[in-house]
Image (cartoon, helix red, strand yellow):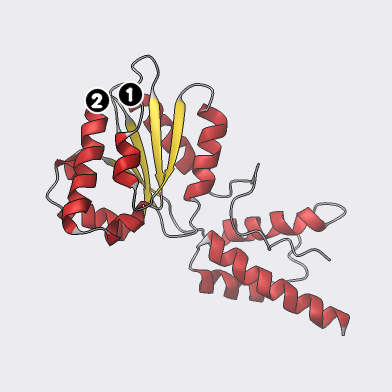
Amino acid sequence: MHNPFTYITPRENEEIIDRINVYNRLEKKILDTLIQGTIIFLEGDYGSGKSLLVQKLKKNLGNKIKIITLDFTGMILNDLRKLPLEKKREILVVIDRFDLSEGLSKENFEKLLDLILELKNRGLSFLLLLNNKTTKAIKKAKSRLKKEYSIIRIPALDYKFSKELIISRLNEIRKSKNESLEPFTEKEIKEVWRNSKGNPRMLLLLCENLFERKMKEARK
């Protein structure tokens, strides 16, 4: 039987579980501030669902605004300097894995922040995907950017929504959808949830291992 927990990264048309309120706040913030330029931090731990929310943004807003996605690399300063400045169309620049900016020297880190602020003042908008540690580093930096952003935080999944996520994956391999946790028990799922600390990616990874174990036991 196919393990429905194998995919721990967002797939096309992946269902958003317990993130719709965060998504709605994010979309509203972007649309309300895009004209004058904005900098938004989408803050969450690795695997918390940041990429999934960006995927939905592209699907819903891609025909209304121009969305440019940059992966953070050592060439990020050059990549930013090459960005188009189109006055006839609003542009949202998404920088994924902005946490990696902490690997830069102090001088280059502050150059990066200042460049983002400069481009924002010239009409671009930014959505930075990062964690709380990087937000704190930006606050300590000698850059005016630390006063020019807003934060939207992604909370940990509570137990109710963790169960919904698990059931939605199990239903992918069922002949008819239902609300059962089988082959898992409620006790096992509570333990998985506690160990994952409400992180969706860790939750799926733990369920993948548990599912494989359950299938082996069933074959004996």
The first of marks 2 and 1 along the sequence is 1
Q: In this view of the protein, which residue sits in the foreground, 112 or 79?
A: 79
Q: Is residue 190 visible from the viewing direction of this image?
A: yes
User: Do labels 2 and 1 touch, CB within 8 Å?
Assistant: yes
Q: Position of residue 131 (x, y in %)?
A: 35, 56
Question: Which residue carries the number 1 mark?
Answer: 85
Residue at image coords 33%, 46%: 76
Question: Which residue carries the number 2 mark?
Answer: 122
Residue at image coords 38%, 14%: 88
Residue at image coords 77%, 70%: 183
Q: Position of residue 141 (x, y in %)?
A: 15, 53
Q: CA distance from mark 2 to mark 1?
A: 8 Å
Q: Quadrant of the N terminus?
A: bottom right
Q: Is residue 133 left or right of residue 198?
A: left
- Residue farthest along the bottom direction in this orientation: 220
Mark 1, secondary structure of its residue? loop
Local packing at callout 2 (Cα closer than 10 Å; few below 14, some 14-19, many 20+) is some
Q: Position of residue 83 (x, y in %)?
A: 35, 31
Q: Is residue 55 above or below residue 37?
A: below
Q: Position of residue 197 (x, y in %)?
A: 48, 68
